Amino acid sequence: MRRYEVKTHSQNGEDGIINHIFSKINTTNKIAVEFGVSAGGGGLETNTRRLAEEGWNVFWFDYDDASNLPPNCVFTKEFITASNAASAFATANIPTEFDLLSIDIDSNDYHVRAALSMYSPRVYVIEYNGNYPGNLEYVMPRDDNYKWKLWETNFGASLKSLVKQGDALGYDLVYCESRGVNAFFVRKDINPFPVKTAEEAYVKLWWSR
């Protein structure tokens, strides 16, 4: 899939991969939800801005302000944790099935995804900790107060742990982008792509020491 990586507003070519995936599975309600949108410049560098510009209904959540909201975007200023993720979805009236979920909070991503197990996005993109190789399991202890510090290496979860979680939730790993930050999962019942193991898909985090 690497040839489909295109950066419009995303950090690492995710825009193109998302577009390619939905070109194969089509869309349903064109709803996308993204956690962690301020770190890339107040919402200017995200995985879902392009979708909003293309007419999707997008929900953004972050503990910091997001400037220059795109059209069709509802922003909620909230520090998302495993404790409040489901209630935040309910308050925003997000349906249990929607097209895309993107989680990039540099911390409890694994635990937040687990807390949203009752929701079934058709595709989800989640940050993995590429400091850990593809054959190693790691999940940071849940800490609802944790905020990532620059270059800290013990955040989040390894790709293998996220693949095991995804499989249990009914999803296949289909790709990891070329800078080793985000993994792409497609729901098993609609997945047309080759299923990847963590070892096959793993890309080392670009800044890993």
Image (cartoon, helix red, strand yellow):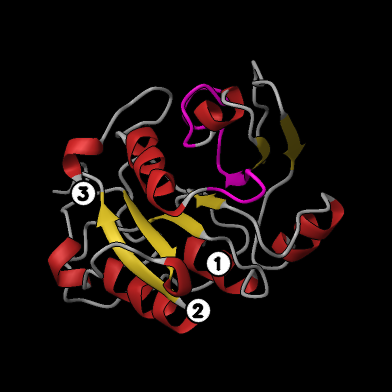
Packing grade of label 2 (10 A; few <14, some 14-19, many >=20) is: some
Taking 47 as reference, is 65 left or right? right
Residue 129 drawn above or below residue 58: below
Residue bounds of the magenta highlight: 27-47
Would you name the residue on which mark 2 appears? 169
Q: Amino acid at mark 1?
A: Arg
> Residue 168 at what x, y percent from top left?
45, 84
> Residue 84 at what x, y percent from top left?
74, 62
Mark in front: 1 vs 3: 1
* Badge 1 element: helix
> Residue 8 at what x, y percent from top left?
39, 22
Mark in front: 3 vs 2: 2
Would you name the residue on which mark 1 appears? 113
Q: Residue at x 54, y 32 (%)?
A: 51
Q: Amino acid at mark 2?
A: Leu
Mark 1 vs mark 3: which is more N-terminal?
Answer: 1
Q: Residue at x 45, y 48 (%)?
A: 148
Dots 1, 3 in contact, CB < 8 A? no
Mark 2 vs mark 1: which is more N-terminal?
Answer: 1
Residue 79 drawn above or below residue 170: above
Dots 2, 1 in contact, CB < 8 A? yes
